[in-house]
Amino acid sequence: MRLPAPPRRLLLRFNMTPMIDVVFQLIIFFLVSSHLARQETQVELDLPKADTGQEPSEAVRPRVMIHVMADGRVLLGSRLVTEHELSRRLAVERRKLGDDLEVRIRGHREVPYRIVEPILLACARAAIWNVTFAVVKREE
């Protein structure tokens, strides 16, 4: 008499390769984006000094950095822009990110107001009202 063969158990195995690929892609994305975010604030500028002010909040809100160099050049992020291009790019960012968009202006302390005024007008044309200036606290 023949004994019945034990039923074969199906071995289920998960293929982890796609999950590992996704995790590595996420790690690379966050490393690159954090590097670019740090790079925006590392433009060497002598910021104006102020007696009063507030520490920047750590709230997660979309922010655009505008750097005004001592020679009058305007950088949006780390890219040189003209006045017309700045208006257009701010309007695009406003449409994309909504009412919560913040514009932070980092200007050299020697820059006259006539250089900063077109930036403020570009923000107003794009309906961006949350505009802040980066300054350093005056030492006493």
Image (cartoon, rainbow, N blue to C red):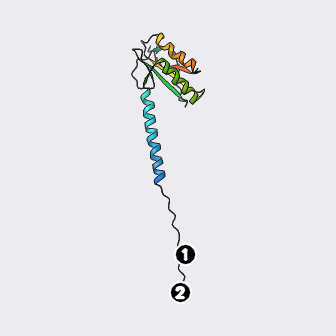
| Quarter of the picture holding the N terminus | bottom right
Q: Earlier in the sequence, mark 2 or mark 1?
A: 2
Q: Amino acid at mark 2?
A: Arg
Residue 134 at x, y = what percent?
Answer: 48, 20
Left-right relation of 92 to 42: right
Callout 2 environment at 10 Å: few (<14), some (14 to 19), or many (20+)? few
Q: Tags 2 and 1 in contact by the CB under 8 Å rule?
A: no
Q: Name the residue at 43% across, 38% down.
A: 31
Residue, x 52% and y 73% (percent of image)?
Answer: 8
Whether residue 51 can be seen here: no
Label 1 sits on residue: 7
Residue 6 x, y percent position in the rendering:
53, 77
Name the element at disc 1. Answer: loop
Residue occupying the point 54% across, 15% down: 121
Q: Nearer the viewer, residue 109 or 124?
A: 124
Q: Position of residue 11 (x, y in %)?
A: 51, 66
- How packed mark 1 is, by other alpha carbons closer than 10 Å (few <14, some 14-19, many 20 or more), is few
Q: Is residue 10 above or below residue 117?
A: below
Name the spot of residue 62 as percent of width and height, x first: 54, 29
Give the labeled residue for mark 2. Answer: 2
Which quarter of the rendered picture does the C terminus lie within? top left
Q: Is residue 4 above or below residue 128?
A: below
Q: Nearer the viewer, residue 113 or 54?
A: 113
Mark 1 residue type? Pro
Q: CA distance from mark 2 to mark 1?
A: 15 Å
- For this orientation, the residue located farthest to the bottom is 1
Element at label 2:
loop
